[in-house]
């Protein structure tokens, strides 16, 4: 039971006190009901995990069933003089006047802790010494305090939160820019249910970041919650909006991580295309080197040379001072060689980079379609598994596809796969291990062809037609003893013939 709900009961009862007690009733071993003259029953359900303090008009009956209930009935007598709450915490104090008689009953103080699984009820004297307690608390249970008969009562650990009863609008300013949920955590007496009610009344979600314009509304809603902390069912449309905002909050970091990878790959792809474009520069440098080797002995010293090339055109060649024409020619040849090597690497890199970018685009599209529950599961898996290994793609029917990019990733992905996942590899050629994550479910033919094309494309057969690709369940794939990572043997394979091209996204 939350602090503000307790406060509403305490406030409603405190204005009518003192009231004469007509005795106790005990409907079960964890519930006591105090019958108050002209008001009804004050119900105290003190056993975990769902304690309750409430006023009920219905008649409650039952004899004391435990030693503590018998002590409570015997010691808490006379008029109920006072009821107080510790701040807005889930701790309530009830003070009884006691009775005069053949044997006087001394005034007592009943302490009711409505603290969930630690709920408890105890009878104390007016000095705070515990006379009887329902569930003693030992140091083995709680390191902060010990509660048992004979000791003085120690309240729960102190805390510092905003008191919604006296809250001023200026006190909300430090929460500007933070989610509404952060403010709710700092409101005394407001828990999960009342926090949801606060959001419902404000027509905001817990993830809404507060602005200065929100503060007057939030201030009014908090005070309305203090005055009437009743709970209402959250409307379906608001529940849907909250679910959507929560899904977006989960999706955002995953999307940003994919976008960062995509920006990195696109920058590398741009560099590769630039390397190809500089092939013309490499040809020009080689031409200059050839001219200097042919006519260098005729050149006078200087910063440039003007020579007629082999087609009859005049060419101006910049020279580095202090170097002979032959040395300048060697420099031009070396630069041309580097540019040509870069272009050759770019030719190999561009298809792989384009495939990776296409895969990331597929992942982004797949991510945008995931539900809140799927995103939560995805976040848990990513935290458990750590950095992603290999390319992660999605088949036409929505199955996950893993593609190894090197021998180490091939080895890791194959070991990570479920025993009933399907494993693909270009027949008899070096290439990627491709895993179709079926986990034993039947795979549609388009998914089989999709995975086979990926295996063919990421192999030495790239660009060829009618490439044989073997596939089998992962449980039929094994790495021989002392074999290098990625080297495997397999049995019970079937073969598909596909073009070694990147499948359409």
Image (cartoon, helix red, strand yellow):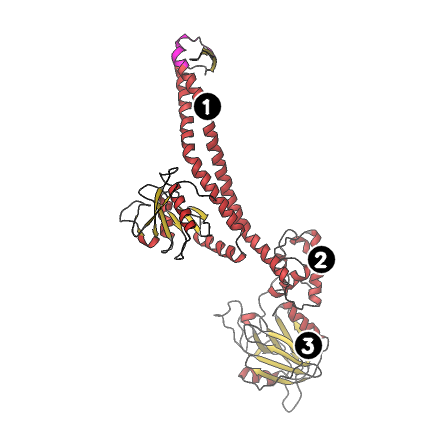
Quadrant showing the N terminus: bottom right
Write the start and end of the magenta stretch as one range.
291-304
Q: Which of marks 3 and 2 is nearer the N terminus?
A: 3
**Coordinates of residue 276 in the picture (x, y in percent):** 45, 29
Instruction: Determine the CA span between mark 3 and mark 2.
Output: 35 Å
Instruction: Specify the quadrant of the image occupied by residue 76.
Output: bottom right
Q: How dense is the environment of label 2, judged by Cα within 10 Å: few (below 14), some, or many (20 and up)?
A: some
Earlier in the chain: of badge 2 and badge 1, it is: 2
Q: Which residue lies furthest to the left in this view?
A: 481
Tell me the SS state at disc 3: strand
- At 45% from the left edge and 38% from the top edge, which residue is drawn? 353
State how far apart marks 2 and 1 are (Cα).
Answer: 67 Å
In the picture of the structure, the residue carrying the numbered disc 1 is 280
Q: Nearer the viewer, residue 302 or 147?
A: 302
Disc number placed over residue 82 in the picture, else none? 3
Q: Residues within 10 Å of mark 3 (few under 14, many from 20)?
A: some
Answer above or below: position of 245 versus 139. above
Label 2 close to label 1 by CB (< 8 Å)? no
Which residue in the structure is indicated by mark 2? 217
Q: Is residue 281 above or below residue 397?
A: above
Q: Nearer the viewer, mark 2 or mark 1?
A: 1
- Where on the picture, by quarter, is residue 297? top left
* Cα distance in 3D space between marks 1 and 3: 95 Å
454 vs 102, left or right, is: left
């Amino acid at each position: 039971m939350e602090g503000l709900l307790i406060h509403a009961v305490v406030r409603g009862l405190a204005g009518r006190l003192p009231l004469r007690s007509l005795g106790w009733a005990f409907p079960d071993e964890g519930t006591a009901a105090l019958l108050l003259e002209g008001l009804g029953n004050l119900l105290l359900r003190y056993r975990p995990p769902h304690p309750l303090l409430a006023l009920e008009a219905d008649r409650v009956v039952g004899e004391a069933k435990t030693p503590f209930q018998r002590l409570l009935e015997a010691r808490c007598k006379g008029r109920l003089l006072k009821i107080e709450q510790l701040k807005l915490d889930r701790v309530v104090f009830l003070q009884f006047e006691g009775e005069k008689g053949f044997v006087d009953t001394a005034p007592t103080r009943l302490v009711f802790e409505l603290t969930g699984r630690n709920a408890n009820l105890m009878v104390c004297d007016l000095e705070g010494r515990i006379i009887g307690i329902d569930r003693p608390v030992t140091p083995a249970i709680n390191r902060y305090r010990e509660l048992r008969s004979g000791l003085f009562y120690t309240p729960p650990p102190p805390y510092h939160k905003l008191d919604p009863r006296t809250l001023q609008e200026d006190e909300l300013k430090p929460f500007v820019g933070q989610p509404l949920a952060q403010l709710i955590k700092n409101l005394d007496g407001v828990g999960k249910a009342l926090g949801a009610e606060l959001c419902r009344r404000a027509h905001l979600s817990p993830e809404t970041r507060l602005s200065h314009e929100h503060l007057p509304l939030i201030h009014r809603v908090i005070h309305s919650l203090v005055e009437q902390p009743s709970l209402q069912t959250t409307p379906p449309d608001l529940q849907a909006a909250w679910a959507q905002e929560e899904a977006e909050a989960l999706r955002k970091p995953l999307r940003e991580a994919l976008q960062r990878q995509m920006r990195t790959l696109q920058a590398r792809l741009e560099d590769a295309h630039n390397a190809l474009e500089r092939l013309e520069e490499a040809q020009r440098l080689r031409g200059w080197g050839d001219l200097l080797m042919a006519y260098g002995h005729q050149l006078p010293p200087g910063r440039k040379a003007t020579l007629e090339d082999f087609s009859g055109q005049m060419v101006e060649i910049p020279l580095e001072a202090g170097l002979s024409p032959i040395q300048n020619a060697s420099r031009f040849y070396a630069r041309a060689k580097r540019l040509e090597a870069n272009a050759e690497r770019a030719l190999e890199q561009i298809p792989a980079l384009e495939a990776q970018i296409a895969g990331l685009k597929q992942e982004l599209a797949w991510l945008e379609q995931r539900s809140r529950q799927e995103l939560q599961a995805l976040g848990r898996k990513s935290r458990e598994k750590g950095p992603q290994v290999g390319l992660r793609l999605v088949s036409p029917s929505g199955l996950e596809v893993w593609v190894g990019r090197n021998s180490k990733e091939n080895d890791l992905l194959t070991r990570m796969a479920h025993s009933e996942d399907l494993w693909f590899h270009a027949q008899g050629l070096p290439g990627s291990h491709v895993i179709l994550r079926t986990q034993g479910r039947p795979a549609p033919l388009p998914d089989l062809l999709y995975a086979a094309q990926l295996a063919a494309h990421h192999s030495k057969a790239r660009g060829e037609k009618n490439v044989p690709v073997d596939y089998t369940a992962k449980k039929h794939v094994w790495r021989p003893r002392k074999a290098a990572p990625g080297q495997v043997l397999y049995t019970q394979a079937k073969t598909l013939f596909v073009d070694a091209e990147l499948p359409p996204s």
